[in-house]
Image (cartoon, rainbow, N blue to C red):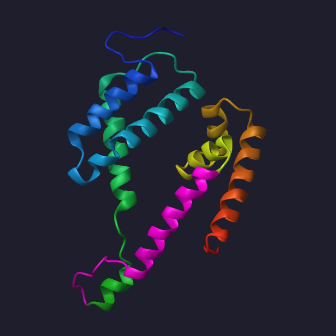
Amino acid sequence: MPGPQPGSIEGFHEVYRYIREAMARVSSRWLSQEIEELAHRAACRLLERSRVNGHQGGFKPAYLNRVAYTTLVDEIRRRRPLVPIDAHVAANGDLVSCEGDPEQACRLSELREAMAHCLGAMIENRRRAMVLLLLGHSIGEIAALMRWNVKQAENNVTRGRSDLRDCLQRRGHRK
């Protein structure tokens, strides 16, 4: 495989820093608090995919800019509240409020707090596996990121799920 090409960026820290700066240039103000996490997630996935595909050169700045931009767009789309078409039809084409139920918002807030507590109380390997799983990584990706074999990743995820479920039930949250 050829080495790094002129004008390319390589290594996790350099890729992460470049993606973070590119995201900061184009992100919305309401998303600025999430830049560090989004950049870290994008850099990890990018480097993992390049490792799996056997890519050993650096990345061109234009490509990293595109990764940063599409990561932000995906996050905005993920957070955008969806209003069912039926609601538009029932409102005769008027704008429909996307505001959620205050009780549901309160329950979700309590659930987030309980999950943070339960994750913090877990054994370290299980907590790491569960955090990566909650971020959307597959078992294979968790194994690669944590430098575990697939069986170790499966065991930590399975036991982490069980620990999280038991802890949430003890704190009054049901299925």
Q: Is residue 126 visible?
A: yes
What is the x, y in percent for residue 89?
Answer: 32, 87
Q: Residue at x 66, y 59 (%)?
A: 164
123 drawn magenta = no
What is the x, y in percent for residue 82?
Answer: 37, 71
Q: Quadrant of the N terminus?
A: top right
Q: Quadrant of residue 43?
A: top left
Q: Residue at x 45, y 39 (%)?
A: 41
Q: How many marks?
A: 0
Relative horizontal placement of residue 158, taking residue 91 as reference (left or right): right
Above or below for 159 versus 166: above
Above or below for 71 versus 148: below
Residue situated in front as seen by the camera: 13 or 123 = 123
108 drawn magenta = yes
What is the x, y in percent for residue 79?
Answer: 37, 60
Q: Quadrant of the C terminus?
A: bottom right
Q: Is residue 101 visible?
A: no
Residue situated in front as seen by the camera: 29 or 169 = 169
Relative horizontal placement of residue 16, taking residue 44 as reference (left or right): left
Q: Quadrant of residue 145?
A: top right
Q: Residue at x 55, y 60 (%)?
A: 115
Q: Range of the magenta residues? A: 92-121
Q: Residue at x 70, y 57 (%)?
A: 163
Residue situated in front as seen by the camera: 21 or 169 = 169
What is the x, y in percent for residue 106?
Answer: 42, 75
Residue situated in front as seen by the camera: 113 or 64 = 113
Secondary structure mainly formed by the magenta segment: helix
Q: Quadrant of residue 11?
A: top left
